[in-house]
Image (cartoon, grey):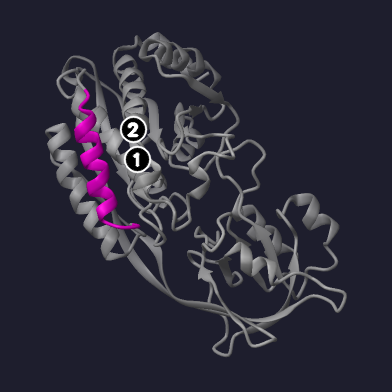
Amino acid sequence: MMLDAALIWDDFQAICDCGGRQTGTDSERTATELLARLGEEATGVAPRRELFRYDGWAAISGAINLENGACLTANPLLRSVSTPPAGLEAEVIDLGRGTPDEFATHRHDIAGRIVLVRHELMFAAGTVHRKMKYNMALEAGAVGFLIAGPLLGALVAGSSGRGNEPGIPAAGITPEAASALQRTSVGYPKIRLEIKGNDRDETASNLIFDMPGESSERIVLSAHIDGHALGESALDNASGLAVSLAVARALRAYVPKKRSLRLAFFNAEEWALTGSHTHIETMTQSERDRIALNVNLDTVAGSDRLTALTSGFSRIEPFLLDCAEAAAVPLGLFRPLQVNSDHGNFALAGIPAFRLVAGFNDHSADIRHVLTPRDRRDLATRDQLFNAARLTSEIVARALSANSEKTQAWRG
């Protein structure tokens, strides 16, 4: 298996050149066409385009007006509802991190107010995800939701977590803005929140490249196309896309004698994993049963340390560690299921699946800048991408040739 470090880096740069790749934007459409071409070059097969509908949305504007006349910028979260034309006037209650305990302790103070919480490192044990915080605010009767980012002077992006329900206006703000919204002896600060967005029915495409082998059983190697408007979505997830292309290219000649390999580029991952959900929901049970393993690459640069989130499938862990030792690439393990990327949909369908991620539990790693304007190509290194490719190639190659008894055992 030959991996070309220079080509991995070139692919990574080309994907970043497309911009943040928020689904439904020209940036995402340009990236999808680029990846259709690069994927075909890597695999030798034309992509099958899985067209699906999703609840589209585009931000128009966001602002916070203070009583002293100051105006602060706010970044509407994906799928946020709009405020009334004149804005939403309400007091702000700061709940710190926004843990369940903090919500419970202030349960009598939340109704009718705008809740302010903090963005956390998403790839860590004990993280309270933004969607959980939003849902707790909604259930407690909050009329709005603000989340402060980790980087001074920088807004934060992400999904509001709203589906088709009415929801509440939600936006990301800077740490400095959060400091201006602190409670004083006078009381809770009152603001006028203005968020404008445009809901619309949209379609997007997954790109599926099927490399047939001797067996109808297959390994699915996946990465998501889409990102956010802030920055280049370089770590999340141009890194995973570039590495998956390299692995498919390296294994192209190997596959025909083994299991089949599917390279899947999913879209609308940032929209509640819609693309991969559609992909799995449209499969028959027989098709799902033929998938031996999903290897999902999402944010595999930004730290020198890689971790496999094994989704409760404990029996794949010795296999992964054996591969890591053979590739001489250190690997950590985290077992509890985290539905924070496309592997979650495979795991929920009973398919052995894991996510390879960099910087798990490392609050000093550059992945802390994911969902901010700092998620740009300079946060990744050639060595990080190459090592992720080395490890993934070893895992996928061994999974392609593993005997059926072993792969069945992975299902537990």
* Residue at mark 2: 385
Locate residue 255: give its quadrant.
top left
Of helix, strand and loop, which one carries label 2?
helix
Q: Secondary structure at mark 1?
A: helix
Image quarter where the N terminus lies is top left
Position of residue 405 measured from the top left corner of the image (x, y, whole percent): 40, 9
Q: Residues within 10 Å of mark 2 (few under 14, many from 20)?
A: many
**x then y, percent, for residue 372:** 48, 56
Q: Quadrant of residue 224?
A: top left
Q: Which residue is mark 1?
A: 239
Identify whether 13 is placed above or below 353. Answer: below
Q: Residue at x 75, y 76 (%)?
A: 112
Mark closest to the chain's N terminus, 2 or 1: 1
Real-space Cα distance between discs 2 and 1? 7 Å
What predominant SS class does the magenta segment belong to? Answer: helix
Residue at the (51%, 36%) spot, across then down: 348
Does residue 170 sit above or below 23 in this rendering?
below
Q: Are marks 2 and 1 in contact (CB under 8 Å)?
A: yes
Residue 292 vertical placement versus 366 (above, below):
above
The residue type indicated by label 1 comes to Ser
Q: Amino acid at mark 2?
A: Leu
Q: Nearer the viewer, residue 372 or 312?
A: 372
Residue 164, placed above or below residue 204: below
State which region is magenta. 3-20
Residue 251 appears in the figure: yes
